[in-house]
Image (tube, coloured by chain):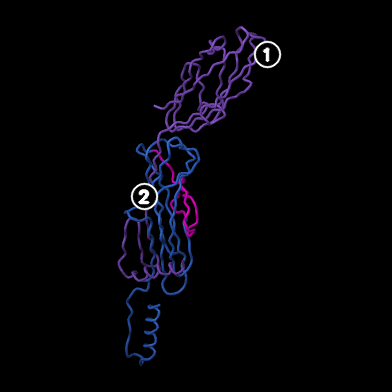
Amino acid sequence: MNLRKLALASLLTATAGIPAVSMADSDIALGASGSATADLNFSIVIPQFVYFQVGASATPGVLDTVAFNLATVESGSGLDVADSNGPVDVVLRSNAQVTISAQALAGSGPLAVGSTQILRTASSASIPLPAFGASAAPVAGPINATGTWTFAYDNSAVFAAGTYTDTVTYTAATP
Amino acid sequence: MRRFRLLLSLLLCAFAMPAGALTFVWNQPVNWIWFVYIEVGAGEPVATVNFSVPAGQAGNGVAVVGTPGVLVRVIGRRNLFGSSNYVVTVDSSTALRNSRGTPLPLSNFTWTSAQGEFAAGSFNGTTNQQFFRYTGPYLGFEDTLTFRYRNNVVYPSGTYTGQVRFTIAQL
């Protein structure tokens, strides 16, 4: 490498007597106080995107379950019942405005009136938790947020004994 | 060395001649050998490093490698004897921008060099960041830089363009 360096230096030494030449990406300056400059362009393409994760797993199809167990609480007593699996992790990344919407509950019993019986709280305004069958207010991008959604059962009505289940799909959409 | 031998010959001639017989006047500037040279990229007037963030991966922290690699060549020489401090600085103070004028600071970019001639680093967004320094009578280094976009910030979509300027000087 030293020989190569010396060769490079010798090459320029041999041409040092010629007038200074300047190309956009190379430059030579003669004299003790001169300086030479060269530019370099940068170009980066960033596509529009949205990444939305509801639940602990980033693997599509792996769902978290919100569970309310009234075994030790009188049904309809008005005492809120916490999600025994909660809270639910949520991740939202996007470089555009995002609107999160929730599918309506389609189950029976308490799930048929889920909008009033299931209480919802979002830990971050950047990842709002909409009501069932509704959309939250749009969130301006860019967004890079993590948070949690917390659910509770309001337990203000009496329903027949049993296990009620349903699946809700949340959607994050960009314009 | 040729310059040194020429000066030595002139001095010897002056001593060999009778005083006052001849007067030599040397008009050539003594600093003509001093020079610095820098070359960044190849094949274009100004080389461009291109980055493309994969869909869905913007801001996920996985660095994106730019293409192509960029050859940087710096050469310099000092007059006659002694050493110089050759310093290469870079101005990365002007952020990249997309068509809507959204800035993307150059501090999002890092570099490594293939053979380690230039230390790995990252732009700091200033006008006078030291990129390389060498002390000696001659300077002759070249290496290929690979740039990377950190990709740990979510920026609005678009094509962002900008420029950095490398400057070499003898101190």
Residue A3: quadrant of the picture: bottom left
Position of B105 relative to B80 (above/below)? above
Q: Chain of mark 1?
A: A
Q: Neighbour class for label 1 at 10 Å: few (<14), some, many (≥20)?
A: few
Q: Which residue is mark 1?
A: A71
Dot 2 amino acid type: Thr
| Residue A75 position in % (x across, y down) | 64, 9
Q: Residue furthest bottom?
A: B18
Q: Which residue is mark 2?
A: B48
Per the rendering, the mark at residue B115 is: none
Numbered range of the magenta stretch:
B102-129
Q: Secondary structure at mark 1?
A: loop
Q: Colour of chain B?
A: blue
| Residue A2 position in % (x across, y down) | 46, 68
Q: Is residue A149 left or right of residue A18?
A: right
Residue A158: quadrant of the picture: top right
For the point 37% across and 53% down, the residue is: A39
Residue A164: quadrant of the picture: top right
B106 and A72: which one is in front? A72
Dot 1 amino acid type: Ala
Q: Chain of mark 2?
A: B
Q: Neighbour class for label 2 at 10 Å: few (<14), some, many (≥20)?
A: many
